[in-house]
């Protein structure tokens, strides 16, 4: 009865009802394929994962500069919310007050402009305060301190390397997210690796002369991206690295918005849109959801006024989330836990 009352009083949940009805009709129209996908998580995740990689490739080849410009504006804030949900809330790290200092403070500092090594020191400090195996703790702390020393020595170059690497780290995190019953996730990884190699070797060289950047705002042209993403390289390698970043960033968004939610869900079958919304509301407080909603709306408005500055501002703040992913992985390694959160009751 409480669920029914909530559905009647929540306008967003009411708005999702017709979408769920369309979804049911599509599932019925595509049976028995839809039944097979709905009933087998590994198969469904494999199909979704390969689709994410292919869509990211096509989008990167058809409109790389627009993908680089609009990807962070449209998908950036939702994927930060997913980071918070799956790297912090679902594993329950937010309930450990020791981590408010060792993890929260460094993450906030990086978000407002502190050097990358501050966040990496936070990875080491967080690994020291939680319960876990001594050998795993030593390994995580040593790795984090080594990266911090390297970041300190490299200076701004460390941020550049990290910007590229964190897209691939997300794919690795997803691959280790839960125990696998089969090998279908390897098809996703193989497709991602093959496409990455293809772009590196020149698969997408044609896009830069295809006239697909018409109307791109000043400050978001190919030359600007080369200066920020591959400043020490020369053509054609510089443009290849930019295109690889465009593709990997798109897959990164797909990992957090599609693949991780599928793999982290307690039940192996898909939820309705309304059930997904109720689960999100149950795990994150209304003020958190409200804050992220306002951030997404504010970023969109800013982008309408000045797309270049909005994108730059988002990326400058969001640099903390790569450290968050490393921090979550380190905590889970030290604790000897699977990355997937423990099963719990859902509405």
Image: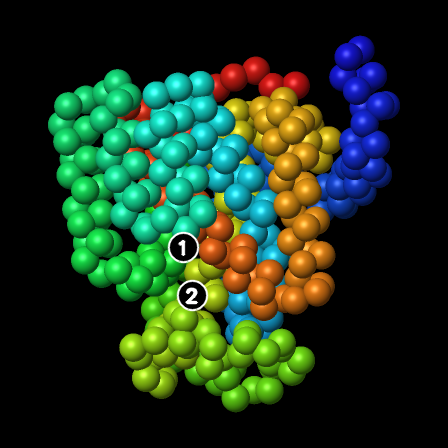
Instruction: Look at the image and tell me in which quarter the N terminus lies.
Output: top right
**Residue 310 visible in the displayed image:** yes
Q: Nearer the viewer, residue 269 or 302?
A: 302
**Which type of secondary structure does the marked residue at label 1 adopt?**
helix
Q: Residues within 10 Å of mark 1 (few under 14, many from 20)?
A: many
**Percent x, y for residue 187?**
41, 52
Q: Residue at x 68, y 42 (%)?
A: 294
Measure the alpha-carbon separation of dots 2 and 1: 8 Å
Q: Residue at x 37, y 53 (%)?
A: 166
Q: Residues within 10 Å of mark 2 (few under 14, many from 20)?
A: many
Q: Nearer the viewer, residue 257 or 295?
A: 295
**Percent x, y for residue 262?**
53, 37
Asked if the residue at tag 1 contacts the one at tag 2, i.e. Cβ–Cβ closer than 8 Å, the answer is yes
Q: Residue at x 19, y 42 (%)?
A: 145
- Of the numbered discs 2 and 1, the one sitting upstream in the chain is 1
**Percent x, y for residue 11?**
83, 32
Residue 245 - label: 2
**Which type of secondary structure does the marked residue at label 2 adopt?**
helix
Q: Nearer the viewer, residue 118 or 265?
A: 118
Q: Quadrant of residue 141?
A: top left
Position of 49 relative to 18 (above/below) = below
- Residue lying furthest top: 1
Number of dots carrying numbers: 2
Query: What colour scheme does the image use?
Result: rainbow
**Percent x, y for residue 49?**
49, 50
Position of 300 relative to 307 (above/below) = above
Q: Which residue is mark 1?
A: 167
Q: Residue at x 54, y 58 (%)?
A: 313
Instruction: Look at the image and tell me in which quarter the C terminus lies.
Output: top right
């Amino acid at each position: 009865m409480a669920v029914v009352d909530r559905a009647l009083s929540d306008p967003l949940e009411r708005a999702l009802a017709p979408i769920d009805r369309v979804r049911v009709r599509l599932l019925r129209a595509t049976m028995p394929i839809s039944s097979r996908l709905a009933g087998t998580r590994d198969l469904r995740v494999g199909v979704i994962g390969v689709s994410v990689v292919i869509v990211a490739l096509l989008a990167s080849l058809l409109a790389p500069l627009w993908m680089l410009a609009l990807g962070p504006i449209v998908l950036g804030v939702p994927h930060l919310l997913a980071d918070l949900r799956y790297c912090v809330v679902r594993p329950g790290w937010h309930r450990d007050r020791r981590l408010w200092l060792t993890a929260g403070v460094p993450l906030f500092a990086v978000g407002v402009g502190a050097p990358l090594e501050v966040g990496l020191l936070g990875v080491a400090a967080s690994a020291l305060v939680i319960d876990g195996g001594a050998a795993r703790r030593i390994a995580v702390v040593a790795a984090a301190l080594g990266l911090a020393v390297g970041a300190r020595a490299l200076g701004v170059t460390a941020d550049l390397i990290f910007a590229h690497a964190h897209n691939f780290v997300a794919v690795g995190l997803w691959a280790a997210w839960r125990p696998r019953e089969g090998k279908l996730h390897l098809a996703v990884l193989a497709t991602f690796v093959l496409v990455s190699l293809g772009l590196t070797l020149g698969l997408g060289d044609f896009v830069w002369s295809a006239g697909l950047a018409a109307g791109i705002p000043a400050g978001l042209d190919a030359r600007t991206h080369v200066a920020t993403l591959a400043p020490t390289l020369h053509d054609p390698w510089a443009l290849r690295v930019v295109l690889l970043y465009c593709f990997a960033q798109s897959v990164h968004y797909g990992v957090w918005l599609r693949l991780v939610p599928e793999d982290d869900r307690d039940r192996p079958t898909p939820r309705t849109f309304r059930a997904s919304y109720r689960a999100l509301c149950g795990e994150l407080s209304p003020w958190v959801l409200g804050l992220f909603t306002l951030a997404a709306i504010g970023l969109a408005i800013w982008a309408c006024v000045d797309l270049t500055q909005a994108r730059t501002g988002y990326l400058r703040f969001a640099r903390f989330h790569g450290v968050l992913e490393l921090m979550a992985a380190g905590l889970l390694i030290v604790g000897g836990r699977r990355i997937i959160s423990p099963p719990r009751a859902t509405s």
